Image: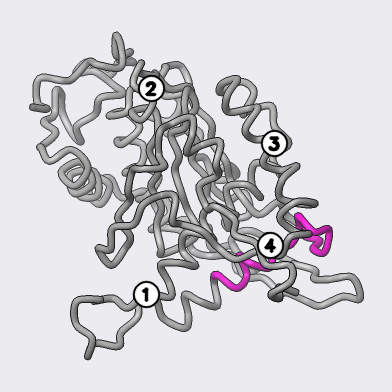
């Protein structure tokens, strides 16, 4: 229990990350348009939780990211899940307490709604696994780790993207690019996302930041087509027990809707314009891609500073 005697502040984006990538004086934009410095994105935490449970987690993850994608892939999946879940929840905790339109004091609408908050309540329960107080019958997440190109400019080697619809984030951190569905209970892996041509090809490449944006759009489309699993959260003498129904439910309905290529194309177009300010033009037939060239072959960007002709 947090009180005045044991209250501490935990950086949502950890100190080692802000130092390595020069984020202390950089800012990020929240969902309602508020701009806030990374250094001010903190949450309240009790001293014991921060130092006894979260610090060892942070130490393992920081070493892995500094060593590279192979070390990140070698992390215990539970460690990586809890660390990513902590970042996601900490940032959304700040966002979900803000008004949708802060410029209008008469507008009391919040960014979220009660149904979303209940979903994040389950996320908060899952995070308590770090305290040894939660058991589950299925690992909560699907996690993908790719290699990424790096720049001599440290700040250019970091990027973060998340979604409020369902717990989902992507993180480009040094030479690693990580995508995680934080509450799909393995459905993305079990139902073939690894088999998508762009995903298979991405594992063969060292990804350029623009290729990561392409994957951001692809994975975002996947999560928007996700049918959340049915689950029960029961309290036990030692904490909580999370029981997940068979993926797809007893009716056998798959947890993901059939892949909609046109919908993906719309998401890619929207995200590309938002993140780069330009249009992505197809080099072949179908949805544009920088991961595959006009012949459908893998495309390895020559270096971090490379730009396609369509990006000014």
Work out whether mark 1 precedes mark 3 in sequence or the reverse, and give the earlier one. 3
- The residues bearing labels 3 and 2 have C-alpha atoms spaced at a distance of 26 Å
Q: Nearer the viewer, residue 278 or 193?
A: 278
Residue 293 coordinates in the image, percent (x, y): 24, 18
**Region in magenta:** 120-137
Q: Nearer the viewer, residue 24 or 186?
A: 24
Q: Nearer the viewer, mark 1 or mark 4?
A: 1
- The residues bearing labels 3 and 4 have C-alpha atoms spaced at a distance of 21 Å
Residue 277 coordinates in the image, percent (x, y): 12, 41
Above or below 254: residue 202: above
Work out whether mark 3 precedes mark 2 in sequence or the reverse, and give the earlier one. 3
- The residues bearing labels 2 and 1 have C-alpha atoms spaced at a distance of 35 Å
Work out whether mark 2 precedes mark 1 in sequence or the reverse, and give the earlier one. 1
For label 1, the crowd category at 10 Å Cα-Cα, with few meaning under 14, some 14 to 19 and many 20 or more, is some
Q: Nearer the viewer, residue 49 or 284?
A: 49
Query: Which residue is label 1 attached to?
Result: 98
Q: Do tag 3 and tag 4 residues touch (Cβ < 8 Å)?
A: no
**Quadrant placement of the N terminus:** bottom right
* Left or right position of 77 against 148: right
- The residues bearing labels 1 and 4 have C-alpha atoms spaced at a distance of 24 Å
Query: Which residue is label 3 attached to?
Result: 59
Element under label 4?
A: helix
Query: Which residue is label 4 attached to?
Result: 126
Residue 256 coordinates in the image, percent (x, y): 47, 56
Work out whether mark 1 precedes mark 4 in sequence or the reverse, and give the earlier one. 1
- The residues bearing labels 4 and 2 have C-alpha atoms spaced at a distance of 31 Å
Query: Which residue is label 2 attached to?
Result: 207
Q: Do tag 1 and tag 4 residues touch (Cβ < 8 Å)?
A: no
Tell me how many marks there are. Answer: 4
Element under label 3?
A: helix
Q: Nearer the viewer, residue 275 or 297?
A: 275
């Amino acid at each position: 229990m947090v009180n005045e005697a044991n209250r501490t502040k935990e950086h949502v984006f950890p100190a080692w990350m802000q130092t390595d990538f020069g984020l202390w004086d950089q800012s990020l934009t929240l969902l309602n348009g508020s701009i806030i410095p990374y250094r001010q994105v903190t949450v309240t935490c009790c001293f014991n939780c921060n130092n006894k449970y979260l610090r060892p987690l942070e130490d393992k993850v920081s070493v892995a990211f500094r060593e590279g994608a192979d070390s990140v892939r070698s992390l215990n999946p539970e460690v990586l899940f809890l660390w990513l879940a902590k970042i996601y929840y900490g940032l959304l905790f700040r966002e979900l307490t803000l008004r949708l339109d802060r410029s209008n004091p008469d507008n009391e609408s919040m960014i979220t709604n009660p149904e979303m908050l209940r979903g994040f309540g389950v996320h908060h329960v899952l995070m308590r696994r770090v305290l040894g107080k939660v058991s589950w019958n299925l690992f909560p997440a699907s996690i993908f780790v790719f290699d990424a190109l790096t720049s001599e400019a440290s700040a250019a080697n970091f990027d973060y993207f998340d979604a409020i619809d369902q717990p989902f984030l992507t993180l480009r951190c040094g030479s690693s690019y990580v995508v995680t569905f934080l509450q799909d209970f393995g459905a993305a892996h079990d139902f073939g996302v690894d088999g998508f041509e762009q995903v298979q090809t991405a594992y063969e490449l060292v990804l350029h930041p623009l290729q990561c944006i392409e994957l951001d759009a692809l994975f975002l489309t996947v999560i928007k087509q996700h049918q959340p699993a049915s689950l029960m959260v029961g309290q036990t003498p030692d904490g909580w027990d999370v029981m997940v129904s068979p993926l797809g439910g007893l009716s056998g309905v798959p947890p993901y809707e059939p892949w909609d290529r046109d919908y993906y194309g719309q998401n890619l177009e929207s995200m590309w314009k938002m993140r780069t300010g330009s249009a992505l033009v197809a080099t072949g037939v179908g949805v544009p891609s920088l991961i595959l060239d006009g012949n459908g072959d893998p495309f390895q960007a020559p270096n971090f500073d490379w730009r396609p002709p369509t990006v000014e």
